[in-house]
Structure formats: structure tokens, C-alpha cells
Amino acid sequence: MKRLTSLHTYNNLIGDEGARSISELKQLTSLCISNNLISGEGAKYISEMKQLTSLNIGGNEIGDEGAKFISEMKRLTSLQIYNNRIGDEGAKYISEMKQLTSLRK
């Protein structure tokens, strides 16, 4: 799967371990992992995918900690992060992502 640039795997309950495995796909530029029981730990793995430009991590449980990790992804231009138990602190991190052209929270 070295040529795979886009992956959509939603509603599969992959959890943090699945997120860790996906994070090894360094050629991906677009990733949809909504509704997969991913926590802040899984968001940390995903945030290491510096090449991503589009991420849908909605419907998980990343919280403020996960939002902080995601906010460090400087190449992201499209982000869907709805239904993730993100509070004011996490929202602040996301609001600082000036490169975003599309945001669904």
C-alpha cells in the first residue's frame, strides 16, 4: 500500500492501536477515521502524520489533549473534528490553526 494517498475507514472501532498502525502510512495526504473510538493517545499518533492535508477525525473522544496534538499539524487545510468532547482549551488550540481553509467542529 505504498501508493495509497487517501484512506477512509469510519465506524470500524479501530481505537488507538488502529490509529497507531495507520500513522505508519506516511504517503497518505487524506484520512477519514471518524467514529472509531480514538482517544487523545490515538490523536497523538495521527498528529505525527505531518504530510496530511485533510483529516476527518470526527465522532471520536480525543478531548482537549487530542485537539492540542492535531493543532500541531501544519499542513492540514481541511479538518473535521466534530463530536470529540473538546472544551474551551481544545477549541483554543484549533482556532490557532491559521492554515485551515475548511473546518467542521
Image: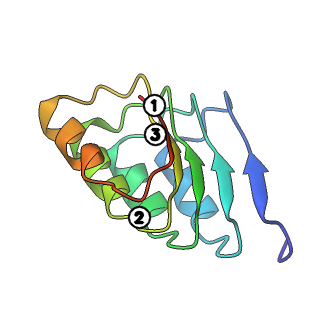
Q: Quadrant of the N terminus?
A: bottom right
Kindly indicate the quadrant of the structure image that contains residue 10. Answer: top right
Question: Depth check: 98 or 16 in front?
Answer: 98
Q: Amino acid at mark 2?
A: Met
Residue 79 position (above or below residue 72)? above
Q: Which mark is residue 73?
A: 2
Q: Residues within 10 Å of mark 3 (few under 14, many from 20)?
A: many
Label 2 to label 1: alpha-carbon separation: 18 Å
Most foreground residue, 21 or 3: 3
Secondary element type, mark 2 = loop
- Give SS at disc 3: loop
Q: Residues within 10 Å of mark 1 (few under 14, many from 20)?
A: many
Residue of label 3: 38
Q: Which mark is residue 26?
A: none
Give the residue drawn at x 37%, y 40%.
39
Quarter of the rendering occupied by the C terminus: top left
Q: Is residue 24 above or below residue 99?
A: below
Residue at (42, 62) in percent of width and height: 47
Amino acid at dot 1: Asn
Pointer 3 or 1: first along the chain: 3
Tag 1 residue: 60
47 left or right of 1 in image:
left
| Lower position in the chain sequence, tag 3 or tag 2 | 3
Report if the CB atoms under discs 3 and 1 are less than 8 Å apart.
Answer: yes
Percent of width and height locating residue 61? 37, 31
| Distance between mark 3 and mark 2 Cα atoms | 17 Å
- Closer to the N terminus: mark 2 or mark 1? 1
Image depth: mark 3 or mark 2 in front: 2
